[in-house]
Image (cartoon, rainbow, N blue to C red):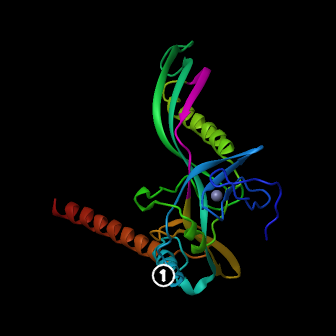
Amino acid sequence: MTDVVESFNCAQCGAPLKIREGEAVAVCEYCGSLNSLRADKTYIIKHSWMPNKLTKDEALRKAGEWMRGGMLMPPGLDEKAVTGASLAYVPLWVFDAKARTDYSGVFLRGGGKEGKRVQGSEEKEFYWKVLGRRQSSFPVKEYKVPLSQKVPFSLEDLMRGEMLNSELDVEEAKAAAAQEIEGYMRGVLSEKVDRFDSLEVKIDFGEPELVHVPVWFMEFGYKGGSYRLVMEGSDGGVLSGEIPPSDFLGGEMRLVIAIAAALVLVAACAFIALNLLR
Ligand SMILES: [Zn+2]
């Protein structure tokens, strides 16, 4: 369903772009270029993607492995519990960012009552990721972009699966990245500063790039409840998964407890034996 909300033309080839409401980027159906839509102009964004490598059966099998391998998972769960699995390509904005942080403040720990005044500046480089969707269960922080799998996007790739368009435009993504980097630097500097008087982070962003990453979104059922599992489609790694609450401990947890109990018993026997031998 395509609602043309405003008329935009591709910055590369001039063809009209089809834009759905709420979206901030659009792939040109004629030349495949990714256009960022801002106010009254469009511009081309570097675009790449990672092909999905798992068939649905393989993704389900990996989900089963994850369920059986989890220490806290209720025993008996496997891929048969999966009630839904769908593949989507999720948009991630990625930036090379150079951040210079100037700060001043007070270090209170170990510096008498008044503390010690501190100031300085730090330079750091980042490869920062911002999710292009406003509502998604995709855990962007935990996700390590497998850069070796990244390939340039071409027009035919539109046919490979559902490519979710970014709802954040590049400026919004940069603003989000800047805010997150500032929070990160504040955390790093809290080793040296207990109370900030000033903190200024200047960020130099490199060329923005939008990367579509393959993600399997799954649901599985357990005792009437429904739980979510998010799996990376290029290597089958589980990015996040909900663990159903269980009224008894999972299989491996019982094994761990049994081994711990056995070790305690062995130690107790050794202790008694040593005492008897004295
Ligand atoms: Zn075009």
Residue at 63 percent of width and 71 percent of height:
162
Q: Is residue 54 above or below residue 212?
A: below
Residue 225, picture quadrant: bottom right
Q: Which residue is drawn at 74% across and 62% down?
A: 18
| Relative image position of residue 244 (x, y in whole percent) | 62, 73
**Left or right: where 208 falls relative to 30:** left
Nearest the eye: 84 or 81: 84
Q: In screen coordinates, is 94 left or right of 4?
A: left
Secondary structure of the residue carrying tag 1 is helix
Is residue 171 in view? yes
* Predominant SS along the magenta part: strand
Residue at 54% in and 21% down: 102
Which amino acid lies under the numbered mark 1 shown in the image of this protein?
A: Glu
201 in magenta: yes
Residue 224 position, x and y percent, is: 71, 82
User: Which quadrant would the N terminus be assigned to in this image?
Assistant: bottom right
Between 161 and 231, the one lying in front of the other is 161
Q: In which quarter of the image is the C terminus?
A: bottom left
Q: Mark 1 points at which residue?
A: 58
> Is 246 placed above or below 166 here?
below
Residue interval drawn in magenta: 194-211
Is 4 magenta? The answer is: no
Query: Residue 151, position in %: x, y?
Result: 46, 61
